[in-house]
């Protein structure tokens, strides 16, 4: 959805809040931090894992403004 600072996903927001509820992530200083020890990459299909890694590599050096401009 268009939003004042870029895009907004109601589903993603709900998912993130559920992950907080189950102590998988924590929200601090406008950042989402994984706090559990589980390695979720081992549980998904190889092609999905490759896609996630490639996505991370592409955007890992983007700051918030860069991401907003990109989207």
Image (spheres, rainbow, N blue to C red):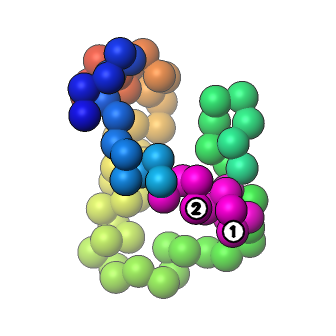
Q: Which residue is mark 1?
A: 22
In the image, which disc is placed on residue 51? none
Q: Residue at x 67, y 76 (%)?
A: 38
Residue indicated by mark 2: 18
Which quarter of the picture shows residue 53? bottom left
Name the side, left or right, on which 1 lies relative to 5: left
Residue 20 spot, x, y in % from top left: 67, 57
Q: Main secondary structure of the magenta part?
A: helix
Q: Are marks 1 and 2 in contact (CB under 8 Å)?
A: yes
User: What segment is highlighted magenta in the picture?
Assistant: 15-25
Judged left or right of residue 56, residue 48 is left
Residue at 58% across / 62% down in the picture? 18
Q: Nearer the viewer, residue 6 or 45?
A: 6
Which residue is pictured at 33% across the width and 66% down the height? Answer: 50
For label 2, the crowd category at 10 Å Cα-Cα, with few meaning under 14, some 14 to 19 and many 20 or more, is few
Question: Is residue 65 covered in magenta?
Answer: no
From the viewer's perspective, is residue 10 above or below residue 54?
above
Residue 45: x and y in percent read: 34, 82
**CA–CA distance between discs 1 and 2?**
6 Å
Q: Is residue 17 magenta?
A: yes
Quadrant containing the C terminus is top left
């Amino acid at each position: 959805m268009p939003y004042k600072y870029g895009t907004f996903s109601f589903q993603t927001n709900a998912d993130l809040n559920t992950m907080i509820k189950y102590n998988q992530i924590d929200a601090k200083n406008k950042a989402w931090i994984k706090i559990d020890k589980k390695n979720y990459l081992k549980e998904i299909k190889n092609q999905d894992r490759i896609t996630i890694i490639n996505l991370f590599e592409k955007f890992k050096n983007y700051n918030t403004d860069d991401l907003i401009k990109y989207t």
